[in-house]
Image (cartoon, rainbow, N blue to C red):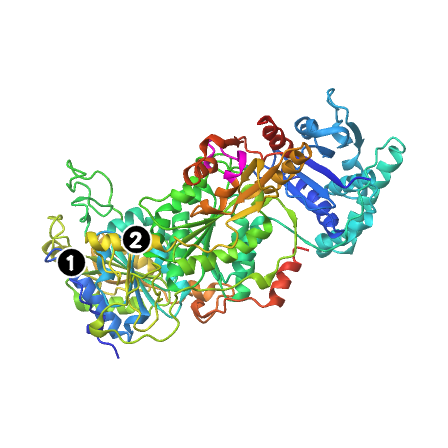
Amino acid sequence: MATFKDFRNDVKPNWCPGCGDFSVQAAIQRAAANVGLDPENLAVVSGIGCSGRISGYINSYGFHGIHGRSLPIAQGVKMANRDLTVIASGGDGDGYAIGMSHTIHAIRRNIDITYIVMDNQIYGLTKGQTSPRSAVGFKTKSTPMGSIEQAISPMEMALTAGATFVAQSFSTDLKDLVALIEAGINHKGFSLINVFSPCVTYNKINTYDWFKENLTKLSDVEGYDSTNRKMAMQTLMKYNGLVTGLIYENNEHPSYQELVHGYDEKPLTKSDLTLNQEHFDKLVAEFM
Amino acid sequence: MINQLSWKVGGQQGEGIESTGEIFAIALNRLGYYLYGYRHFSSRIKGGHTNNKIRVSTTQVRSISDDLDILVAFDQETIDLNYKELHSNGVILADAKFKPKKPEDTDASLYAVPFTEIATELGTSLMKNMVAIGATSAVLDLDIHVFEEVVREIFGKKGDQVVAKNMEAIKAGYNYTQEKMDGDLPTMQLEKADGKHRMFMIGNDAIAMGALAGGCRFMAAYPITPASDIMEYLIKKLPALGGAVIQTEDEIAACTMAIGASYGGVRALTASSGPGLSLKTESIGLAGITEVPLVIVDTQRGGPSTGLPTKQEHSDLMAMIYGTHGEIPKIVIAPSTVEEAFYDTAEAFNLAEEYQCPVIVLSDLQLSLGKQTVEPLDFSKVEIRRGKLVTEELPELPNKEYFKRYEVTEDGISPRTIPGMKNGIHHVTGVEHAETGKPSESPVNRVQQMDKRFRKIEHIHFNTPVYKNAPHEEADLLIVGFNSTRGVIEEAMGRLEKDGLKVNHAHVRLVHPFPADELRPLVQSAKKVIVIENNATGQLADLIKMNVGYPEKITKYVKYDGNPFLPHEVHSKCKELF
């Protein structure tokens, strides 16, 4: 059986030393091994930005696409081959700005893939502009007087969009993060995992220390029930979204693949591409 | 006796104009006539003038006609907007209900038939369309029983009584018209057709059927006129083959999802029209640099922006060839008949996998929506060829190296593995990359990979890059077109030949890479060249000048008012050159 080492390759990440994304990479590698995957049965699809490079740093099939579109690509891969484990990933700009519509619709559609967002509240690769996750007042190169737009609350947004699996983590909580990614992979449907992954170069506000001070573990919230959507929403609002752990999971709702009319139970990659003459004649007859 | 007829029915959108045309056309198609339809419609559901013009002929026709024999009008607007097309022996059959007035400047005859009144007496005014079909049959001296089978198919689900009532309405329209207009009525009797059963379909159906036959098992698309029929057909047909269609949140998702599916190893399709293609262009560039096979249909309509969404145009040509930032290998094919739309779409999936690049199937509104009689499709001509897709087991790679998915090869085409294949792991990225897919900015690698990608399309094998009807070694005139102008050029050519001119016809079928060597001899041997296209700037004419040369010989004839060319327009424009 494959170990996490089998998911390592020889590419040296070009992330800054101390970047939160290193832990996310390690967590995906460990989770993949823990759920018993072989590298060739994992496809990691990523967007553009610092975090988007992650698909090139894992020994698996990897697709580094265009900005904001990791989700439709990943959904296409899964539809082609339902036997694959598909992870989409990218940053908060990728998922909550340019790709926000795909995020909402992927949640609604509930195709069985896992989406990991490395959320650092800043645009890093373009060298420090505001992100839809930046807080009001946050000063960046594009908001020298401080951001005047409200930050998006992705976890609340996911709940209202009908998500069946919503989780949040912090990149230093490696053990928890690995467990959440495993749970996300095992969840039958779309799973969204938002990971606070600090940018040590451009975000001097939302630092490791800041998160340590401000985050609350849901396991420490008395009586928290991750199957209770209303409680999930109220808790997120109470803590201003700064919680970690499994926020919500609904296992009652079937995944998209289970609902698509006529969809083959074996991967489409194994379909017979030819029609037989009889089938073709039937199609023709409809136009006679 | 006449060997062809042009019939038009018009009224307000939502009044059943389309189904009137449909019933009339299907019945005649089953008698063995060749039909060619043209729908005039607007971007709204209820209200607004709409009409359906149908040409009926005993021989193959692929163009709308210059004039009109019979106009069936459900309102005065239909008469006012269309009467000028009627020739002097033409007939207007109008609903007496709106007290139709014949315009002064026409020699055509007007007959008021109480379509609505007769239908209401029989039960419901909805059947006024059937009465109109009956009235038409009287003028054509057509046995109304030919409609029985179609009426049964359409209304059968509603019960025998509804079928009987509708047939009664047809009969009543027939009887009324024959009795009242007795002697006075110019009958137009069509020569008997050959009675052969042929398909009657729109280009979009042929495209979708071609996709099915070509092994397409996944489609991602976003609704748009005039391309939605392709998605709607596949939604009906793919479940039986285990496949699926996803209606995405936007065009970008549609294109990238198709890319994901294709990378995943399934033959995937996306289809749209101009506005959708504009949104897809970044993704098409991604498919180009990542060498993911991808088939995209562009059913052209009037642009730019929302433009003329329900009208004919050819203005996407350059955009489809060049429209992405950066430079990628791409194949653009342009079927010119419904039959070709079927074969070309099936073949597009082979080309996409063989050359590992985006293949655009370029159609236009008239080809995609003009319902017409189609010669039998030869299913045995459809092949499945998957190019360098790896099918055998691969040797283990030492030290977890990546598979050389972008190996530099002589023909530029590299072996392709798909996720799930052991020892085939590689990286795919829109960043310039080395042979294993790992990013590389090395100048040497950049040139190697760019050259490799373009080498792939240096020798494209496409069955008919240029359709040629060139009877003359040296012609006075070469007429060139693409897409649905095929029929109109053929008709104009026939008339020009009668005028004593030597005319050759070339229809460009492989638009990119441009088949310059195929076209050059025809351009060289013609005294003059005229390029017929539905756009304002003469994009095909420019392509020919760029790739073939001879700019001094080349004239463009463009039309961009939203309507297809008429045979007499092309005929007289060509004559002007001599």
Q: Position of residue A125 (x, y in %)?
A: 18, 49
Residue toward you, B72 or B248 = B72
Q: Is residue B529 magenta?
A: yes
Residue toward you, B114 or B428 = B428
Q: Position of residue B567 (x, y in %)?
A: 64, 34
| Residue B203 relative to residue B449: left or right | right
Which chain is indicated by disc 1? Answer: A
| Residue B66 relative to residue A119: left or right | right
The image quadrant that residue A70 belongs to is: bottom left
Crowding near the residue tagged with mark 2, few <14, some 14–19, many ≥20 C-alpha atoms within 10 Å = few
Residue toward you, B385 or A64 = B385
Q: Which residues are magenta?
A: B523-539
Which chain is indicated by disc 2? Answer: B
Q: Which residue is pictured at 69% across the width and 43% down the height?
A: B21
Q: CA distance from mark 1 to mark 2?
A: 38 Å
Secondary structure under badge 1?
loop
Q: Residue A130 has which mark?
A: none
B167, above or below A76, in the image: above
Q: Position of residue A200 (x, y in %)?
A: 11, 53
| Residue A238 relative to residue B375: left or right | left
Q: Which residue is pictured at 14% across the width and 52% down the height?
A: A199
Q: Amino acid at mark 2?
A: Asp
Quarter that holds the N terminus of chain A: bottom left
The image quadrant that residue B393 belongs to is: bottom left
Q: Residue A20 has which mark?
A: 1
Q: Amino acid at mark 1?
A: Gly
B140, above or below B431, in the image: above
Q: Which residue is mark 2?
A: B451
Q: Check chain identity for marks 1 and 2: say if they share one.
A: no
| Residue B277 relative to residue B210: left or right | left
